[in-house]
Image (cartoon, rainbow, N blue to C red):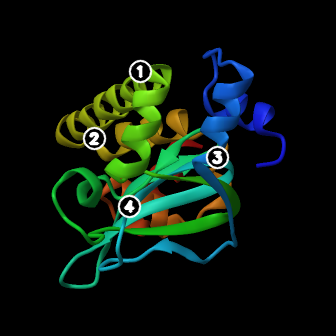
Amino acid sequence: MENAFNFVQEVFKGVDFTPEETHEIASFFTRVNIAKGEHLLRVGEEIDSVYYISTGCLRTYYLDESGKEHTIQFAVNDWWISDYIALYGGNSTAVLNIECIQSAQLYKLNVEPNSFDLLCDRIPKVERFHRKKMEKAFASYQKRILANLSLSAKERYHLFVTSYPTIEQNIKNYHVASYLGITTESLSRIRKELV
């Protein structure tokens, strides 16, 4: 992969690798460009990878039986995205959709045991880095669950704009509303009250 050193430094901020380790790590990733409106993943598709977002914005969402969308996550630069339920929950196919909402450059990492585990065995610093990222993501999801259970819609909206200060103006209102678990009308009312 071209510019392996810069790419590995971008993904693994704060971790020092030898030149040999850098090239080996880079060989496990594939660059993927995806246009706004395209889906990276749809329910029912085979899933075996996680994606590092270099540029752009994506969202993970679930479509319930009535056809209502529930946005689970927005992911922006320097975040990771995948269907973790499918990857780590015992499913072989996706249960979530991942849509690109701003054109994105991603780096795909195959996490099947024959690849990612091999990389972690060869370079333990990768495993430690990945574990720390997963721990932070788990804590973030728990905070979101607590917020949804205990905060008002206005408080959840304030938390959203604090957590995602640069993307609100670039995504559709119904995406924000579905993330917050409210209607677009409620979102409009909350915004008017805060002006």
Give, as a three-letter code, the residue at label 2. Answer: Ser
In the rendered structure, which disc, 4 or 2, sits on the residue that comes first in sequence?
4
Residue 115: give x, y in percent of width and height: 43, 48
Of discs 4 and 3, which sits in the foreground?
3
27 or 140, which is in the foreground? Answer: 27
Residue in the image at 24% along x and 43% along y: 148
Residue 103, image x, y percentages:
71, 65
Q: Earlier in the sequence, mark 4 or mark 3?
A: 3
In the image, what residue type sits under mark 4? Asp
Q: Please, which residue is most extreme toward the bottom here?
A: 66
Earlier-in-chain disc, 3 versus 2:
3
Mark 1 — residue? 128
Q: Which residue is mark 4?
A: 48
- Residue position marked by numbered label 3 in the rendering: 27
Q: Is residue 130 left or right of residue 67?
A: right
168 or 28: which is nearer to us? Answer: 28
Q: Where is mark 2, residue-wise?
A: 152
Chain-order first, disc 1 or disc 4: 4
Distance (Cα) linking label 3 and label 2: 46 Å
Image marks 4 and 3: residues in contact by CB distance under 8 Å? no
- Judge the density around disc 2: few (<14), some (14-19), many (≥20) Cα neighbours within 10 Å: few
In the image, taking residue 17 as reference, residue 112 lies left or right, namely left
Q: Secondary structure at mark 2?
A: loop
Name the image quarter holding the C terminus.
top right
